[in-house]
């Protein structure tokens, strides 16, 4: 990691200290949804799993975290 990247990340993370709890929660939710959509769109495993459970791309925006399945070694097939 370059020194520039390290400094940039420091200031970016440091700015979170000034945010309200609600803003941090909204940011966390937004980032989680982005990861969830990325997995759905780019991973055959997650796409097939979520589709088999009735989740669609549109439903991922409002899906409760508790409704997501727990992934263990048996499901992955290791």
Image (cartoon, helix red, strand yellow):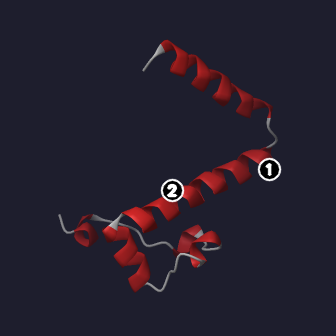
The quarter of the picture where the C terminus appears is bottom left
Q: Say the numbered circle drawn on residue 58.
A: none
Residue at 39% in and 62% down: 42
Left/right placement of residue 55 relative to residue 31 reads left
Q: Determine the residue located farthest toward the left in the rendered image.
A: 78
Residue at 67% in and 22% down: 11
In this rendering, the count of numbered labels is: 2
Location of residue 15 with respect to 35 vertically, above or below: above
The quarter of the picture where the N terminus appears is top left
Residue at 60% in and 52% down: 31
Q: Nearer the viewer, residue 17 or 4?
A: 4
> Residue 40 at x, y = what percent?
44, 68
Residue carrying label 2: 35
> Residue 49 at x, y = what percent?
37, 76
- Distance from the alpha carbon under mark 2 to that under mark 1: 20 Å
Q: Secondary structure at mark 2?
A: helix
Residue 33 position by quadrant: bottom right
Earlier in the chain: of badge 2 and badge 1, it is: 1
Left/right placement of residue 20 relative to residue 16 reads right
Q: Secondary structure at mark 1?
A: helix
Left/right placement of residue 26 relative to residue 5 reads right
Residue at 53% in and 75% down: 57
Residue carrying label 1: 22
Q: Nearer the viewer, mark 2 or mark 1?
A: 2
> Residue 39 at x, y = what percent?
43, 62
Location of residue 56 with respect to 60 vertically, above or below: below
């Amino acid at each position: 990691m370059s020194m520039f990247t390290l400094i940039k990340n420091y200031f970016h993370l440091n700015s979170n200290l000034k945010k309200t709890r609600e803003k941090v929660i909204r940011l966390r939710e937004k980032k989680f949804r982005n990861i969830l959509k990325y997995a759905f769109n780019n991973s055959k495993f997650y796409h097939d799993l979520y589709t088999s459970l009735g989740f669609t791309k549109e439903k991922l925006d409002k899906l409760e975290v508790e409704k997501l399945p727990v992934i263990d070694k048996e499901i992955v097939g290791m």
